[in-house]
Amino acid sequence: MLKKAFLVVSGNAFGSALLLLRNLIVARLVSPDDYGIASTLAISMSIVEMLSYLGLNQLMVVDKDGDDEHFQRAMQGFQVMRGVFSSTVLFLIAYPYANFLGIPDVAWAYQVIAVIPFINGLQHYDNHRMRRHMNFRPAVVTQSVAPLISVILLWPIAMVYSDYRIMLVSLLVQAISSVSLTHIMAKRPYRLAFDMTLMRKATIFGWPLLLNGVMLFGVFNGERLVVGRELGMAQLAVFSMAITLTLTPTLVLAGASQSLFLPKLTAARDDARSFNWLGVAAIEGGLAIGLLLLLGTVMIGGPVVHILLGAKYEAMLPILVPMAVMQAVRVAKSGAATVALAKGRSGNSAVANFFRILSLPVSWYAVVQTGSVFTVLWIAAAAEALGFFVSLRLAAKRTELLLQPLLIPVILFTLACAAAAIDNHLLQPQTGLIANLSWSRWVVAAMIIGGLGSMTALRGYLVRRFT
C-alpha cells in the first residue's frame, strides 16, 4: 500500500514539476506582457471546467457499478457531452472575456483554446476504472508523460512563435497527448453510451463537487482576473508567476500529507485517543508545509527568482514574501480539512474557502482605489486566516478534536508569518544570496524553526512512520 501511495504522490509531484518547468521556460522565452496573456489562457479553461466538473472520474472509482462496462460507457458518453458543452461555452465567451481583460485582439486565441475541453471529453475512463483495483500506473503515466511531451516540444514551437502562442500550442499538445495516453494505456475498447438514468445519478453525485469547483476557481484565479483587468498583462505576469512559484510546492506537499494521514485517520475514527493524536499531527502537517514555504522564500526566494527568470521578473521580488505568507496560511487549512474528511465531513473546505470568495469584491474595490497588488495580497491573507480559524473550529466541533495541543504551534506560526511580513517591509528580497541573508532573515528563520520544533505530534508521527 505504501509503495502504491508513493507512486501516486511521486507521479503527481513529477507532473506538477513539469508544468512548473513549462511555465518557467515560457516566461523566459516571451515578454511579461505575453506571459500575462498566456496565463489568461489557463484561466479561461478553468472557467468552463468550473461550470461543468461533476467528478465523473471519481464516481468511476467509488461507485459499486464502476467495473460494469455499460456504466463506463455511460460515463464516457457523459464526458463527451460535458466536453462539447464546455467547448461551446468557452467559444461563446471568448470575445466578452477578452474585452473584460482589455485585450480584444487576443479573442481568437480563446476561441482556439476552446477545442481543448472537447479533446479532454474524448478521454478513455479505463485508467480511472483500474484505480479501483489499486492499479495506478496508467493514471500516473498519463499525468507525467503528457506534460513531459509538452515541455520537450517547447523548443520547436519557439522556433515558429515568439509570443503567447507558444503557450497556446503547448496546451493543445498536452491535451492531445493526455487523451491519447488514456487510450494507449486502456484495456477495454472505447465505447460510448448515453443513459439518462446514469447521467442523473452522476449529476446528483457531482453537484457538491461542482459547487466546490466554483469556490476553488475563486481561490486560485479570482485575484488574477482582478489584477489582469485593472493593472494590465505585465503586472498579471508577475502576479501569476509569484502564485505559481509559491502554490505548486504547497499543492504537492498538501497532497502528500493527505495521502499519509487520511487512511490512518479513517481507520482510527472510532478510537478517540488515536484519532485526536493523528488529527493534531495532520493539522501540524499543514502548518509545517506553510512554514517550510515561508522559510525557503525568506532565505533564498530572491536569488532563486533571479536565477530562474532573470532581470525582467525582478518586479516580483517585493510581492514574493507577502504571496508566500498568504499561501502559507492557505495551506495551513488543509490539515483540518483532512481531519474532517476522515469522518465524512467534506463540506469543511468549502466553508473555509468561502471567506476568500467573499473577499474578492473587497480586493477588486481596493485595487481600483490604490492600484496596488500588496492590497490584494493582504486582503486575501486576512480572508485565509479567518478561514483557517473557522476550519479549526469546525473540525473540533464535527470530529470532537481537542485543539489545546495546537495552541503553541498556531501562535508560533502566526508570529512567524508576521515576522516575515515585517522583515519584507524593512528589506525586500535581494537577487544576490549573500546580500539577501541579512541578520533579520536569520531571526525570521529562527522563529520558523521554533514553530516547526513545537509540533510534537507531527514529529512523533513521522518518527513512527519512517523508522
Image (spheres, rainbow, N blue to C red):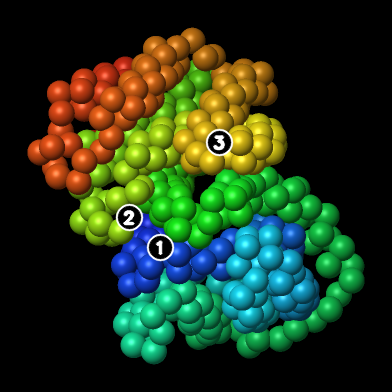
* Dot placed on the residue nearer the N-terminal end, 3 or 1: 1
Q: Amino acid at mark 2?
A: Tyr
In the rendered structure, find residue 32 and report the number of the disc placed on it.
1
* Dot placed on the residue nearer the N-terminal end, 1 or 2: 1
Are circles 3 and 1 on residues that touch, CB within 8 Å?
no
Disc 1 crowd rating (10 Å Cα; few below 14, some 14-19, many 20+) is many
Q: Whole-Å distance between the Cαs marked 3 and 1?
A: 22 Å
Q: Quick one: 56 or 101, which is closer to the camera? A: 101
To which quarter of the image does residue 11 belong? bottom left
Determine if residue 339 is in view: no
In the rendered structure, find residue 313 and report the number of the disc placed on it.
2
In this figure, which residue is indicated by the disc labeled 3?
A: 370
Q: Whole-Å distance between the Cαs marked 1 and 2?
A: 8 Å
Q: Amino acid at mark 1?
A: Pro
Residue at the far right: name it: 196
Image: 422 above or below 340? above
Q: Give SS at disc 2.
A: helix
Q: Give SS at disc 3.
A: helix
| Spot occupied by residue 390 in the image (x, y as percentages of width and height) | 62, 23
Q: Quick one: 103 or 158, which is closer to the camera? A: 103
Q: Whole-Å distance between the Cαs marked 3 and 2?
A: 22 Å
Disc 2 crowd rating (10 Å Cα; few below 14, some 14-19, many 20+) is many
What residue is shown at x 31% (from left), y 30% (from top)? 424
| Spot occupied by residue 146 in the image (x, y as percentages of width and height) | 44, 76
| Spot occupied by residue 258 in the image (x, y as percentages of width and height) | 48, 42
What residue is shown at x 65% (from left), y 86% (from top)? 190
Are circles 1 and 2 on residues that touch, CB within 8 Å?
yes
